Image: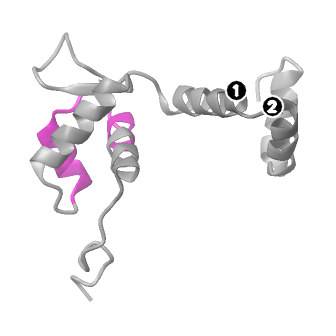
Amino acid sequence: MAGTGPRDRGERRSAGELESEVLATLWASDQPRTPAEVQSELGGGLAYNTVHTILSRLLDKGLVVRDAGGRRGAYRPSKNAAELTAEVMHQALDRGPDPIAALQQFVTGLSPAEEQALRDLLGGQAP
């Protein structure tokens, strides 16, 4: 039934969730995107000002850059998804009191395919 999703009942996305959605939209495109284009691609009735605010926050955090060579007001990610994920993982390890124990816990939760890819990487092979 239309109009009965969680967003229609007044639930709001958190700023972190919105930032993730905006970044995913930018990663999915090989061209910089304007706030209006991001708004259109996200759908869900987000206001233009909300999208612009999220892009400004991402710019302040260094996660996006304004496209200097293209259209004015267009944004592109400063890092790809894998680079950002690796950076977050490093930051988490740096914050903890025992990074080796954290790595051990992380590795025990890997799928067989992820474990094999990690073994290949540590062995100097491409996964």
Task: Write down the region rendered in magenta.
Answer: 24-43
Q: Nearer the viewer, residue 111 or 53?
A: 53
Q: Is residue 18 among the parts visible in the rendering?
A: yes
Q: Is residue 41 magenta?
A: yes
Q: Is residue 70 magenta?
A: no
Residue type of the residue flagged with mark 1: Asp
Residue that carries the numbered disc 1 in the rendered image: 94
Left or right: residue 14 compared with residue 32: right
The residue carrying pointer 2 sits among few (fewer than 14), some (14 to 19) or many (20 or more) residues within 10 Å by Cα, namely some
**Cα distance, mark 1 to mark 2?**
7 Å
Kind of residue at disc 2 = Pro
Residue 4 position within the rendered picture, expressed as x and y whole percent measured from the top left: 27, 84
Above or below residue 74? Residue 53 is: below
Which label sits on residue 99?
2
Q: Looking at the rendering, which quadrant does residue 73 occupy? A: top left
Left or right of 43, for residue 27: right
Which residue is at a point 38% across and 27% down the rendered structure image? 63
Residue at position x 78%, y 43% in the image: 114
53 relative to 8, above or below: above
Quarter in which the C terminus is drawn? top right
Residue located farthest toward the bottom when viewing the structure as drawn: 1
Identify the secondary structure beneath mark 2: helix
Q: Which mark is residue 39?
A: none
